[in-house]
Amino acid sequence: MSSLAQVSQVAGDPAVHPTAPAPETQKRGWTAYLLLLPGALWLGVFFVLPLVQLATVSLQSRYPGFPGYYYRDVNLDNYVSALTDYAPHFARSFLYAGLATFLAFVVAYPLAYAMAFKAGRWRNLMMICVIAPFFTSFILRTFAWSQILADEGWVAGTLNFLHLLPGGHIINTPVAVIAGLTYNFLPFMVLPIYASLERADPRVIEAGGDLYANGFTTFRTVTLPMSMPGVLAGTLLTFIPAAGDFVNMELLGPQRGKMVGNVINDQFLAIPGGYPVASALSFTLMAAILVMVFLYVRRFGTEELV
Amino acid sequence: MTPIPRRDRRPLSPPAAEVVAAATGGLSRRRLLGTGVAAGAGLALTACAPPSPPTGGPAAVKLPKDVSASDKTLRWANWTAYLDMNGKETKSPTLEAFIQQTGIQVSYSEDIDDNDSYYAKIGPQLRAGQSIDRDIITMTDWMAARIIRDQLCQPLELIQMPNVVNNLLQPLKDVSFDPGRQHSITWQSGFAGIGYNKEKVGRELKSLDDLWTDDLKGKVVVLSEFRDTAGLVMQSQGVDIDSDWGKAEFENALDFIEQKIEEGYIRKVKGNSYLEDLTSGNAVAGITWSGDIFILAYDTEDPNWTFAIPESGGTLWSDNMMVPITSTHRRNAERLMDYYYDPAVAAQVAAWVNYVCPVDGAQAEMEKIDPDLAESPLIFPTADYIAEKNIQAFRVLDADEDIEFADLWSTKVMGN
């Protein structure tokens, strides 16, 4: 029976035994699903379920007269409020995240380039230096920056002494926030760019020289395009968390001009009954980022991400 | 200490009162929220009116088994700069003595920066019946009221705490949110007023308006606790914050604060972490809590740090020790509460924290430690002092105001 089925398979004529598919094929099919199971379960429990929960909460209404209580509803006002009341916060989040992504790119590319092509025996050490900050908590590092940039710290002190600081302070300004975002997400930019540069075939770059292109032209037409998957991954990995971040604004930012992450944080934590609006804001933020990423990948997308 | 005038919760109409009683007893946020899948499946496509609240008497509070006798540990969450410390600020002498005396290992953590954010962290866990790894939490009056109302703390056995029964100051024995102190025991009380560095400011600050001058522009921090910051501003606008006032008065104060932020006078609105801005020099003055400024002076070895009640008045509040509903160390917690109501111990704490001491007899003990402090009106205020300085407690807000005012504060002042 089984040998017959094999023969018919080899012959490419499944119609001969339509009711008896090859046991191997069936087994292989099940194996694939079984292998998918842990991942699917993980996604189901830790991604889909919370998302459904968040979606339902985002449509709930406050229970009149009972602070902190809700009832199930289809209350689109939460979304209207998210989009109208908090439009400036969204805009600011995307602007700051965009600037931080750009700055991180400017800093990260030469660094990744040096690590991939010029570092030699220093490469591992440089790699450790890039990763080392992860050994300390994100909040602690940001907090350390708030001390470094404080009015009586040496940075602001020196700049003030040289009369180079309009306004007199660095901390509690948007500049400090963007600097903090850039600093905190820099490794996410360096690593993918490094990975794609490191993989690049040096002979292709040499070929650029052989074809009489100068260094800059070679870089522009050969090296940069080869590293585009890394650049794309790096910008996404930087922009997405930076747009939703609230820690940098909280610790380094001014009192006015908050980002959308701060609003979500405040609605969840400080306002009794703020859950629906916070959920609606979270959903809107997710949707907005999804659309932006989609457009970005379509415009600059390459065949593969790192 | 003088009786603190308190305004009772606005009386509700009988049907409303019934609803509230039913709701606070039998309705949980979790039940209304529903669980993810069921909620998703049951999502109707039409908007619906609020369902009628479930009826039924208050649910019996289920207390976890107390393991204090066999497990001699205790975990205490408190605010920054709120317990006596040794010179290196590594250990608390009174707490060490308690550990010696009772063998109960106490882990003390300065977890609480702000009532709202701390409650947001522990509230959902307590409602779900989970441990928060703390056996004593220290919450301000209005938050203590909310926690008691939601039955998220355990009733205390006063019979186990003779010191508390004997030495708790008379006006604090019966507070509106916890009649008979069945659920909460005062830790310290305090004032909100102006804290500043006399040398860096270069003059004395007497009224709230002294903060809004050009040389202090961008060097002022204020508290994120709106009952204190808005309370002080309302007093400066001539409102009696302990009597009947409404949304209009509150909004006036917020408009004023908003304007001062936008003009750049107020740099930041913060929880207890405002002390870091004062230490790092980002700010030299602000609306602060009374005791903090004394500890700041000690920590920075700078006697120029000064606290003053503004001419228009200050606010008075208390923080209260409570045992979270899921704690299994209630007896240990009660021993600690009782220990801190020994007048000698209370005086030792007060000498360090410089907050208003709730313990009768501590003033006499303070004479032995530091006669000057025994005279300090910021630790042992007399009724005359309270009246003369126009020190008031922010009136109790009803449930709707609670949300509405928090909302207003968040958008107008916090900038969210």
Image: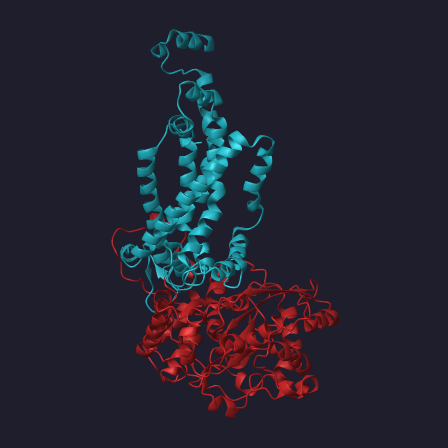
Chain colours: A cyan, B red
Question: Is A294 situated above or below A216?
Answer: below
User: How far from the left and from the top, in percent, is residue B383?
Assistant: 52, 91
Q: Is residue B129 visible?
A: no
Q: Nearer the viewer, residue B340 or B109?
A: B109
Figure label count:
0
Residue in the picture at 70% in, 86% down: B368
Question: Quadrant where the C terminus of chain A lies?
Answer: top left
* Residue placed furthest toward the left: B46
Q: Nearer the viewer, residue A252 or A151?
A: A151
| Residue A127 in which image quadrant | top right
Q: Is residue A126 visible?
A: yes
Q: Does residue B5 appear to the left or right of B255 in the view shown? A: right
Question: Is B301 situated above or below A303?
Answer: below
User: How far from the left and from the top, in percent, is residue A44?
Assistant: 43, 41
* Residue placed furthest toward the bottom: B384
Q: Nearer the viewer, residue B189 or B149?
A: B189
Question: Is B43 situated above or below B256?
Answer: above
| Residue B31 in which image quadrant | bottom left
Q: Does residue B189 appear to the left or right of B331 in the view shown? A: left
User: How far from the left and from the top, in percent, is residue B206?
Assistant: 46, 84
User: How far from the left and from the top, in percent, is residue A121?
Assistant: 61, 31
Question: Quadrant where the N terminus of chain A lies?
Answer: top left
Q: Nearer the viewer, residue B381 or A54?
A: B381
Residue in the picture at 55% in, 41% down: A131
Q: Does residue B404 appear to the left or right of B1 in the view shown? A: left
Q: Does residue B49 appear to the left or right of B201 in the view shown? A: left
* Residue placed furthest toward the front: A162
